[in-house]
Every structure is written in structure tokens, then in C-alpha cells.
Image: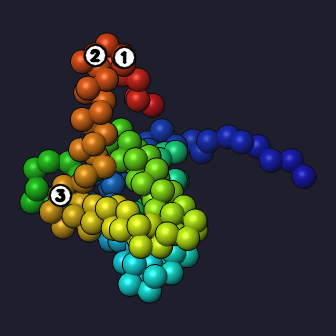
Amino acid sequence: MKFQLTLPADASTQAPELDRELQFGPGMRAQRLTEAAFMLAALFTQDVRFAFVTFAFSVLQAISPRWALVARAVARRVRFRGQHRIGDLYFDLRGSRGACAISVVVQAAGIGLVWAGHPTFGFIILTVPTASFLMAPTLGFCAGCWFYVLGRDWLARHGWLKRGFDDF
């Protein structure tokens, strides 16, 4: 059986529409709340297996922020109608990707500590991304995005980073 890897004819118009839905629609908020729910389940039950779901979501979004599965599902069902109360963007491709990469490292450290026999320290570390997953949709502050932008600007000021390195 042969498979062709070709893009649909309307693929070039779908990406900007998806980005617009993710920027202004409720999809990313639902994504973050779903991730927070799995992390809270892991923390309250002391069962790290719940954290694996959020870890997988974060890995996918670190690869490409458009791979937010819950957000895409919500964006298909709840369309943005052009009415938003908050003037700033919630979803930014580079910031979201960088924040998820930082979150992957922190979650891996927490899960690793739990597996290594240090559950108290592991679950304490897992509270950091959990808090960020809760704050991002409710308060509009993403700790991972803040650290990403802070690190990117520091590297650029010192000349170790060229402008546009994370554009894709």
C-alpha cells in the first residue's frame, strides 16, 4: 500500500485560522486546565501516572505549539466570534513552545525524583508546572513564558543568540 504525504489544497488557509482560534478562542485555556487537572490528580492521589498525560501534552507542544490536542478539539467546537475582553494575546507560538520545553524539563525532574524514591521532593517540584497551568488560563500569567522570554532576552543581550532563531 502506498501513502502520499501531500498537504490538502486548503492547508495554507487552515494554519492562520487555527492560530487565530488558538490565540483568541477558549481552546488554550481548556488545554491548560486539562493539564492542571491531571497534575492535581497526580498530586492529590500521589500517583505519578496521572502526570504522564500532562507530560505527553507538554512534549507535543514543545515540538509544535499547534499540537495542543485539547485546544484543537475545543477550537473545532467553540468558534471565536471576534469578541474578546482581554486585549493581549494568550497564545504565542514561540512563547508557548519555549514554556512547554521548560515545563518538560521541570516535569521530567519531578517524575524522575518520584521514580528514584524521593516522592516528596518529586511532587513538590511537580507543583510548579501545576501552578503555572492553573495561573495561565485564570490570571493570564504563564511562568514558563516569562522564564523563556527572560532567558531569550538575556542570551540576545550577550550576543549568544541571533534574532529570529525560534521563528518557524
Could you say whether the residue bearing mark 3 is in a helix, strand or loop?
loop
Residue 30, placed above or below residue 149: below
Q: For residue 136, what is the image quadrant?
A: bottom left
Q: How many marks?
A: 3
At label 1, the amino acid type is Trp
Q: Which residue is painted at 41% across and 29% down in the image?
A: 166
Whether residue 160 is visible, yes or no, is yes
Q: Which mark is residue 158?
A: 2
Q: Which residue is painted at 36% across and 68% down in the image?
A: 124
Q: Which residue is mark 1?
A: 160
Q: For residue 29, what is the image quadrant?
A: bottom left
Q: Residues within 10 Å of mark 2 (few under 14, many from 20)?
A: few
Residue 82, placed above or below residue 39: above
Q: Which residue is painted at 40% across and 47% down in the image?
A: 102
Label 2 close to label 1 by CB (< 8 Å):
yes
Of pointers 3 and 2, the one earlier in the residue sequence: 3
